[in-house]
Image: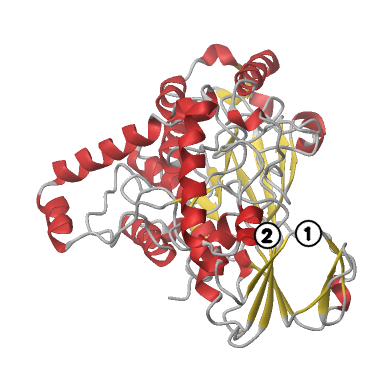
Amino acid sequence: MNTENNHNTAPHNTTPHIVIIGTGFGGLGMAIQLKNAGIESFTILEKAASVGGTWRDNTYPGAACDVQSHLYSYSFEPKSDWSRKFGLQPEIRSYMESCATKYRLHDHIRFNQEVESATFDKESGLWSIRTKSGDTLEAHALVSATGQLNQPAYPNLPGLETFQGKVFHSARWDHDYDLAGKRVAVVGTGASAIQFVPEIVSKVSELKLFQRSAAWVIPKPDRPFTGFEQWLFEALPIADRVYRSLIYWKNESRALAFTRYGFLLNAFKWQAKQLARKKIKDPVKRAKIIPDYPVGCKRVLISNDWYDAINQDNLDLVTDGIERIEEHAIVTRDGSRHEVDAIIYGTGFKATDFLAPMTISGLDGLDLNQAWKDGAEAYKGLCVSGFPNLFILYGPNTNLAHSSIVFMLESQIRYVTQCIKMLQDPGLRYMNVKSERQDSYAQQIQDRLKGSVWEAGCTSWYKTASGKNTNNWPGFTFSYRLMTSSLDLQDYELQPATEAAGA
């Protein structure tokens, strides 16, 4: 289907009009719930040529989810025929595409439209959104659904421009480049590398794995679903819902370990060490691959083939820092020269750079980057004072270490839908969260984070350079859902419409 020409007819002039940025789980879910609420006046701007967000972008070998399939999907759109307990990237993306088709979202989507800037006009109460192609849209409400994991992070390696081989990031995998027989360097040992290194290690002649810090890796309780299980989920929907509920409460119980009682995570530490002893023959490699920081301080990873990959003779685990890149090699600080044909970055994302690289201007020209100069924060992770009618899905301090972000997104979407219904009132120009409410909320979040395992002393992508945790939610997901279940207008400054503003 040629989408670019078909999606420029989204409705514009109905009040209130909404613009949604992104077609990941947040953007699609927001659009679906607006439709369910009888609101059709919305446009979705998508920078790529298809839907899927991070599940469209990350196509590296072995890409999969670390949350169970039945929970990592919309509660209102169950899928009974998941192929396995933990979904693989192609299946998750296919699920998202089927949701977009079923709920007829394509008529609202403008593909290949990357947002460059958004500016709020307090006189009209409208957002003016400009795309990189030069198009401009106006909206009464702006919903950012760009997520936290959409901008790849690249390390600053001296001499990289001189390298004569192939270079790419795992989130921008080059499938046209044949790795067979190549000498490959992988920089980083995070969640992506945990998945793609085992897939490529047997294909390459040498794999140099450059590790800055090891990860705690525990077994992944994954397996294919049987035909009978899939039939049961289809024939008896209650079985599907009960299974999802069991997963939810099992995962939810782990929140206590991450947020209050870190010692409970020592069971994971024991698991990881036992698995490493069993799988890795080389004691030097084994010592390097076990972290020296408390379990849970950084993201705990799950894999059944990571330690097997580390054990391979053609994998060299390098823990000395990279000093520079040469035409055909990586030179480490100990003076060793590692000749390679390709460099693959498994260095994750700029998770603390929310809404980047867009320029967002609020009341009286207030710049969002300036408002967030000390680290991103938002009321209930959704609204920022000084930026009326702007709602951020998967915003500051809404990330999870123990459960499904889709559950959190559904909570946020319900809250935002209530706000948008309020904005249907022709007598209301805009709603702006009170600065004192935001400040109080942000302080409560930071106070609660102080007792969490994420404050155990290590650096992680959860934190800014100054050490502020801007990403994680320090509690249960059901407590977040309760907190966002109803809209309290006392939290907002409500600016009435005037004849002058409407003229």
Comparing 51 with 318, the one in front is 318
Q: Is residue 290 above or below residue 88?
A: above
Residue 11: horizontal and vertical position, in percent? 48, 52
Left or right of 260? Residue 345 is right
Residue highlighted by disc 1: 155
Q: Which residue is mark 2?
A: 188
Q: Are the residues flagged by discs 1 and 2 in contact, CB closer than 8 Å?
A: yes
Q: What number is the disc on residue 298?
A: none
Residue 48 is drawn in which quadrant? bottom right
Q: Depth-wise, is mark 1 or mark 2 nearer the camera?
A: 2
Could you tell which of marks 1 and 2 lies nearer the N-terminus?
Answer: 1
For disc 1, the neighbor class at 10 Å (few under 14, some 14 to 19, many from 20) is: few
Return the residue nearer the eye: 220 or 482: 220
Q: Residue at x 10, y 47 (%)?
A: 236
Q: Amino acid at mark 1?
A: Pro
Q: Quadrant of residue 375?
A: top right
